[in-house]
Image (spheres, grey):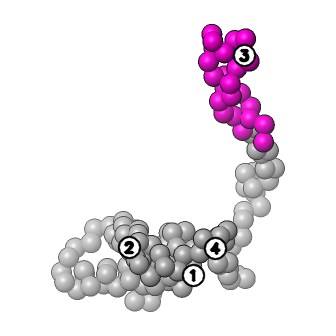
Amino acid sequence: MPGSPDETYRPLMFSIAYGMTGSVGDAEDIVQDAFLGLTRARRAGTTIIDPKAYLTTAVTRLGINHLSSARVRRETYVGDWLPEPVVVPADAPGPDPDDPIGEQPRQARPPRTGLRPGTPTNLGTRGLVLGAVDA
């Protein structure tokens, strides 16, 4: 119901569902189903002590059920997958300009490491050596 205190959790629930499905439409459906379940539980007389925890659990379970459904498995694309873009309203708050983390340059990727065989002369004594992998 619009204006209820539980509506403050809707953006969080949407982000959880969207992170699982990658689809705006599916995420909105999952969130709506979770809120419907909360309303039904309250009307049945169930006391919900922590609605945020209830909704988070419901969204997670509904998302898992959605992803394991036969319809989704048939429609799954096998190639490179990119999630749908999320449209952010113009009046939505952006990144905090005073946030020092946002100003940090991205770290360079560390070199890939893995097991590589030692030289033939020391292979018998050392076995495999941990070192950089040539990519």
Q: Is residue 133 above or below residue 71?
A: above
In the picture of the structure, the residue carrying the numbered disc 2 is: 65
Which numbered disc covers residue 83? 4
Determine the residue positioned at 81% across, 50% down. Answer: 105
In the picture of the structure, the residue carrying the numbered disc 1 is: 24
Residue 53 appears at what percent x and percent y?
36, 65
Calculate the distance from the C-alpha at mark 1 to the C-alpha at mark 2. Answer: 17 Å
Calculate the distance from the C-alpha at mark 3 to the C-alpha at mark 1. Answer: 56 Å
- Give the farthest residue toward the left: 45
Calculate the distance from the C-alpha at mark 1 to the C-alpha at mark 4. Answer: 9 Å
Calculate the distance from the C-alpha at mark 3 to the C-alpha at mark 2. Answer: 53 Å
Q: Badge 4, how many Cα within 10 Å: few under 14, some, many 20+? A: few
Calculate the distance from the C-alpha at mark 4 to the C-alpha at mark 3. Answer: 48 Å
Q: Is residue 114 above or below residue 76?
A: above
Can you say which quadrant of the picture contains the N terminus?
Answer: bottom left
Classify mark 3: helix, strand or loop.
loop
Residue 76 appears at what percent x and percent y?
54, 75
User: Which numbered disc, 3 or 1, marks the residue that appears first in the sequence?
Assistant: 1
In the picture of the structure, the residue carrying the numbered disc 3 is: 120
5 magenta-colored: no
Q: What stretch is highlighted in magenta?
A: 112-135
Residue 108 appears at what percent x and percent y?
79, 44
